[in-house]
Image (cartoon, helix red, strand yellow):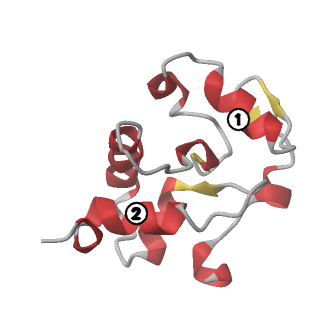
Amino acid sequence: MKENDSFFGQVYEVVKLIPYGRVTSYGAIANYLGSKGSARMVGWAMNASLSSVVAIPAHRVVNRNGVLTGKHYFGSPDIMQQLLENEGINVESDKIMNFEKYFWDPVKEL
């Protein structure tokens, strides 16, 4: 089975499409893939993506409230925030400010 046929592979293909300076949620990706209740599995995919040889912009995936719940998987707890801030996204207390402004919904955008 090719990687893109797996759930994780499908997640990675969606995450690669998130535009620079935008973010989405675990649940939005799961919903787009037709697995509405699988947000946690999307989180596992994001964790596994950090060891991928292909660049996956996992820092652009946050929880449904804009909280950087996956930040501890980036090696240093500050890296995820730094990557988002480098893209012009303001983060305070591990939460994206004006989350609605930056939110990218694959159901609407793809």
User: How many discs mark residues in the rendered view?
Assistant: 2
For numbered disc 2, what is the local secondary structure?
A: helix
Q: Residue at x 46, y 72 (%)?
A: 31
Three-letter amino acid code at the position of disc 1: Leu
* Quarter of the figure with residue 16: bottom right
Residue on which the image places disc 1: 83
Position of residue 30 relative to residue 60, above or below, is below
Residues at badges 1 and 2 in contact (C-beta under 8 Å)?
no
Q: First in sequence: mark 1 or mark 2?
A: 2
Q: Nearer the viewer, residue 102 or 40?
A: 102
- Left or right of 37, for residue 59: right
Q: Nearer the viewer, residue 52 or 105?
A: 52
Residue on which the image places disc 2: 11
Residue 96 showing in the rendered view: no
Where's residue 28, x and y in %?
54, 65
Where's residue 35, x and y in %?
34, 71
Three-letter amino acid code at the position of disc 2: Val
Q: Nearer the viewer, mark 1 or mark 2?
A: 1
For numbered disc 1, what is the local secondary structure?
A: helix
Where's residue 29, x and y in %?
49, 65
* Quarter of the figure with residue 30: bottom left
